Image (tube, helix red, strand yellow):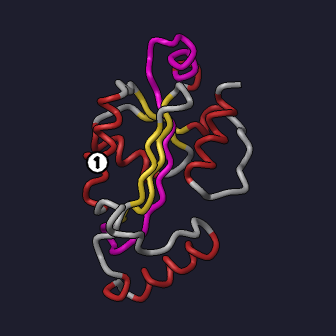
Amino acid sequence: MKQHVAEMMMVGEKNWAIMDVEYIRTSKTHRCIRKLYILAKDGFTDLELDFYPCARYKDLDKRYQRSFRFCKAHIHKLSYEPNPRYAPPCNTVLAKLNAFIVYNDIDFILYKGGRIEKDLCEELDIPSYNIECFGEMGKTQSHDSKTEVNYYYANLCI
């Protein structure tokens, strides 16, 4: 698979993008997308969105509040609720992501590790590949979606 994806990237006929997603677990069955960043193969065309969670923090079960506080302190550093005036609700993520994919004629998406990215791509019926299959790419010192995606883009395009 590694060779196949590398060939698709090099041939230039296929359009691809790299995506990273941060989410908040709000229940056993739901992950609210909190932030999404996707960068097309040209290195300039991108989409960065904060999403507003579908559940209020005070309504979360205590274990999910604890999980969020841990992630905020040690991983993504995002507030629970962005400004609702500028952030669409999390239930619009598929429509926003699909619009980017269609408008930019994206053939497949690359992501680093996360299961949430793979799940979103499966829901949109677009092929996706974990870039960890390309071997050791190193780690960024950031959990900011834009920083991570740009780091992996730079490493893939060298």
At a point 30% along the width and 46% down the height, the residue shown is 96
Q: Quadrant of residue 13?
A: top left
At a point 38% along the width and 31% down the height, the residue shown is 127
Residue 42 in the image: above or below residue 113: above
**Viewer-proximal residue among 110 and 105:** 105
Question: Is residue 21 shown in magenta?
Answer: yes
Q: Quadrant of residue 34?
A: bottom left
| Residue 33 screen position, x and y as percent | 38, 60
Amino acid type shown at disc 1: Leu
Residue 11 in the image: above or below residue 124: above
Which residue is farthest front?
85
| Circle 1 residues within 10 Å: few <14, some 14–19, many ≥20 | some
Quick check: 102 left or right of 128? left
At a point 39% along the width and 70% down the height, the residue shown is 83
| Residue 9 screen position, x and y as percent | 54, 20
Question: Is residue 91 shown in magenta?
Answer: no
**Viewer-proximal residue among 140 and 133:** 140
Q: Secondary structure at mark 1?
A: helix
**Viewer-proximal residue among 1 and 92:** 92
Q: Quadrant of residue 55?
A: bottom left
Question: Magenta part of the protein: which range?
Answer: 5-30
Residue 132 in the image: above or below residue 92: above
Residue 91 in the image: above or below residue 152: below
At a point 35% along the width and 62% down the height, the residue shown is 87
Label 1 sits on residue: 94
| Residue 73 screen position, x and y as percent | 61, 76
Q: Quadrant of the C terminus?
A: top right
**Viewer-proximal residue among 114 and 76:** 76
| Residue 105 screen position, x and y as percent | 35, 24
